[in-house]
Image (cartoon, helix red, strand yellow):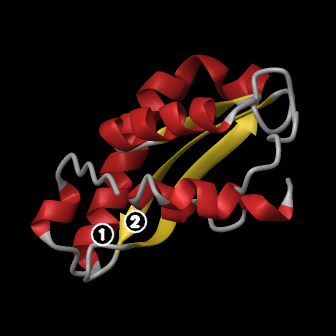
Amino acid sequence: MQPRWHGLHRAWRRDSALKDVIGDEPLPALAAPSPRTLEDLHERIVASRAQGWCTVDGEFEPGLVAAAAPVRGVRGRIVAAVNVSAPEFRFSGRLDEAGPAIKHAADRLSARLGAPVTALRDLQVAG
């Protein structure tokens, strides 16, 4: 994974942060299904933000699948994530059911951390 991917969580909150984090360089071709353009990456982030979780199906490493959801703190900001990853042959067919379950776990953790109720709804923030 390229160092510039670090901090991508900020783009989950604000669309305007994406270019700041990624920059103007072409996106690295980490695997065949990886996003190739900033627009493609943006579309994936917007879709993931809308459903409250994201999935990875070989985008970063061939044969690796995962699902993750943000954990929010007392101010509603992302402070952590719940993530489950596995080899494709073990988990690929279960990503659609894993996403909502992982979001539920992340929302429960967020509530325990004192996240505002509005942060636990289908939060969509654009910058």
Q: Residues within 10 Å of mark 2 (few under 14, many from 20)?
A: many
Q: Is residue 6 left or right of residue 117?
A: right
Q: Position of residue 91 (x, y in %)?
A: 65, 27
Q: Position of residue 127 (x, y in %)?
A: 35, 57
Is 12 above or below relative to 94? below
Name which residue type carries label 2. Answer: Val
At horizontal 27% and vertical 62% (from top left) the residue drawn is 108
Disc number for residue 82: none
Q: Is residue 122 left or right of residue 33?
A: left
Is 118 above or below relative to 68? below
Q: Quadrant of residue 5?
A: bottom right
Name which residue type carries label 1. Answer: Ser
At horizontal 63% and vertical 67% (from top left) the residue drawn is 7
Disc number for residue 71: 2
Q: Position of residue 21 (x, y in %)?
A: 65, 62
Task: Measure how far apart labels 2 and 1 are at the Cα level.
Answer: 5 Å
Relative depth, front residue between 24 and 63:
24
At horizontal 27% and vertical 73% (from top left) the residue drawn is 76
Q: Residues within 10 Å of mark 1 (few under 14, many from 20)?
A: many
At horizontal 22% and vertical 74% (from top left) the residue drawn is 115
SS category of the residue bearing label 1: helix
Q: Quadrant of residue 70?
A: bottom left
Q: Residue at label 1?
A: 110
SS category of the residue bearing label 2: strand
Q: Is residue 71 left or right of residue 66?
A: left
